[in-house]
Amino acid sequence: MVTVTLTVNGETRTAIVGGETTLLRMLRDNLNLTGSKLGCDVGDCGACTVIVDGKPVNSCLMLAAQAEGRDVETIEGLASMDRVHPIQKAFEECASLQCGFCGPGVIMSAKALLDEIPNPTIPQIRDALGGNLCRCTGYVKMIEAILLASRNMRGEAVQSIR
Amino acid sequence: MDKKPKVAEKDSSVESVLKDPGILRESVASPLVTYPIEVVVPKARQQTPAVGQRATRLDGRLHGLGQTSYIDDMTFPGMLYAKIKRAGVASARIKSIDTSEAEAMPGVMAVLTGKDVPNNAFGPSLKDQPVLALERVFHAGDPVVAVAAVSEQIASEACEKIKIDYELFTPVLDPLESLKLETPGVHAPSANIYQKKFIKKGDIEKGFAMSDHIVESQYRTQMVEHVPLEPHATIAMWDANGRVTIYSTLGRITLGRADIASTLGIPISRIRLVATIVGGNFGGKNEITTEPVLALLSKKTGRPVKSVFTRPDEFIASTTRHPLIMDYKTGVTKDGRIQARKIRLVLDGGAYCSWSETTLSKACILSAGPYNIENIYAEAYVVYTNKTMTGAMRGFGAPQVCFAYESHMDEIATLLKMDPLELRLMNVFHEGSISPTGQKLQSVVVKESLLRAAEKFGWKGKGSGTSGGKLLPKDIIDATTVRV
Amino acid sequence: MRAFELFSAKDSRDAVALLAKHSITSKVKVIAGGTDLLADLKFSAHSPNVVVDISRAQELKSILVTDDGLRIGSLVTHSQIMRSPVIQEMFPALVDAAHTIGAVQTRNLGTLGGNLVTAVPSMDSGPTLMALEAIVSIEGTEGRREVPLTDFFLGPRKTVLKADEILAEIIIPKQNLGKPTHFLKFGLRKGQALALVNSAASFWVDWDKHTFVAPRIGLGAVAPKVIRATQAEAFLEGRKITPEVMAEAGLIAATDAKPISDFRASAGYRKNLVAVLTKRALEGAYALAQAKR
């Protein structure tokens, strides 16, 4: 067993897990953050995407112990009591999600993209979503939502929510 | 405000509390759920009709927040995890099952085989599927043993310790082989052809006689897996009144209740089936899978039991789209009017019937295409093979035959050196057309749609937009008949 | 996934010591980015008892130009390769190759060293490094040893690494710094796709004679390991640079390749791809040479 202490959505969290426990399982089972989903467990579908030290990763391919001391952002950390994140709002307005299962992963990939490139082109958006599979929507409305969110975020000069 | 609040973990040990009593004063927030309480009122549905208005989906907000509770997100106190050991062989007789090592493992709470199932047969139409395979295995995804343990990891390891002795048989893999009477029955003594359908309209021999050209082609489509992002998931638990509550990704819950009632041998009124927000169905979650097994495991252990398919399970143990082998023979006059169409469909029905009857029916009824044809003969068969179960998937047989009859129309157009759009406009249904099964059709706008689409795409005529490929006949039967 | 004991190494020396200690008594695997190892272990029957995590070894994460050449630490991720100004300037082909790997999420975790050590013949980083005559620096209990990349791979998923060794650095020799190189991958999708064929071409240009100098071609997914198209290279050396020569070299490279037929493609189709991709890789390298002139 290993003790893992890390920052999740701005808070220090600790859990005691088996060495083989992935970051995804620790988030879901130990920390009750079930927003990140298990779709394939082998890094193909991207439903488990979280942001670690500013970079989007497949949390199913990272051991929990490898996240020791790191800064992790999950879907649960985007909204606040006052408002949803502009990306979440844009996804809502553009009806970008249907069953919703791929949603958290896609939104985290989108956030990582907009954090780095506030004004992305459509090819850049496609590249950023290349690791997120969706079986329902066909991705078009997600791309629209990301373009909308990027406009809103630049217009409002939004600071990071947390 | 303290930017990084320390959060007390719910399993803080007594030792750590004694060492640092400050923990008791910290907020236990696991998870920190945020509720932007801003009610969104859709702009639609005021005084004017909703059509043409923007409206937000009811579930959109929760999806975006990651707060939608799918079944794998749910836990119940004392919940166990179940894993299913699957056959891994295509066709076999089960000689023996030894679960002793698995049962002895610490953390394993119950192990079930087919003999523990009151009525070990179910299915949406033919009841040919076992809950847990007992004597025979019909495809590699067949569930054979179920294990419930305190963790998923222990349940998996227990499955590896189960020893099953198989007598292997030669599997039937080719549906055309399965069609032959001399091929051994997959579900012997039942025949391999487990359902057929025939549609006869007019007289095709007369129709062919009136044709200037006869075109024959064969088309094949492949097996497709739905790959819903959310794998199949189920949680079962009982109450002291003898009622079982099952949370399931299952789409057809009334049918599910009936199947669960019959397999468990209990009245349907004792079954409460809760269908939740599902992460994609597409037809693949239309029938029960592990629900009866989990109910039995829960009854045996007295605790809630959860089971989630792995992604490999989704491919080998859940239903798929029927592959079809479609033979088309069409007679046309030299100006492109279809006189007769003869069709044979062979559906690869996989290991179990599942939704094959509906698929067969739809495929057969739609096989001639949306065209006015006086003389039609369509015969359709679905056969057993020792492959993954084929069942419902968006379209139920329609997409496969559509590929066939539309490809066929293109090939006819190429042969006649006609514009493929012209060929269709000449033959397509119009208001009041009679379908192959005698239905008088209304609100038919196919012609108008084709013409409008042609305008939008800039279709300029004769072979426009196609690869302009030549018809390369593999066999020329005679001057007027071509097999492609 | 089956349980295993996890040991986190502080640095490469610690990692080697842990491997030396545990590989005597246990089945041991090394984890860096985890994108190959964990994907493999999730549904696998064979599992290790011990996993040594080397992902914290900071000294294996640098990209440096030294007197020996360009030294890339084995823990450099594919994303870091794509963002490195040095690599963008000197070897855009390495940036291209990294970009074809998986998706953003896997590129942020997956390492160059891991890609080489997993040693699948369809690896995307190997061919370009082969064409650049890269050398790998291996760290063991006795210290470092260097092996040319051409000798590093033994077969599918097999390298010369011993149980107590880790891949530490990848070195592109000084004489090849800035050598015009182009890489092309053909997969069944634009992203998250396994290569059907990979081709990388690298050469200097003698501008007086307008001929190929030191042409090198690396091919992937067409043999049990990444290979050099030696016959095609011999054909090109000293020959005049023309489109016809490049096309001819492509055809010869197709004979250097020994692909198999599998459910993704037939051997014949792959050979055809080798010919076309090699020709285009040569054209791409030439365009780069002209631009740099």
Image (cartoon, helix red, strand yellow):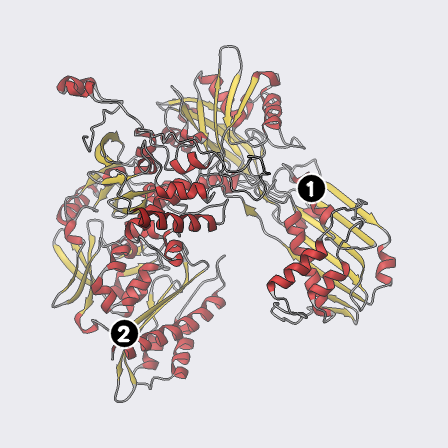
- In what quadrant of the picture does the C terminus of chain B appear? bottom right
Q: Which residue is mark 1?
A: B192
Look at the picture and state if C177 lies above or below B90.
below
Look at the picture and state if B415 lies above or below B368.
below
Q: Residue at x 82, y 48 (%)?
A: B200
Which chain's residue wears label 2?
A: C
Checking the image for residue C180, the label placed there is 2
**Residue C203 locus on image (x, y percent):** 28, 76
Total numbered labels = 2
Left or right placement of residue C136 versus residue A28 in this view: left
The reply to whether callout 2 and callout 1 are in contact (CB within 8 Å) is no
Q: Residue at x 65, y 62 (%)?
A: B454
**Residue B183 locus on image (x, y percent):** 68, 46
Tell me, yes or no, whether dots 2 and 1 are on the same chain: no
When asked about the image quadrant of residue B447, the answer is bottom right
Tell me if I can see residue A95 in this picture.
yes
Tell me if I can see residue C43 in this picture.
no
**Residue C23 locus on image (x, y percent):** 22, 43
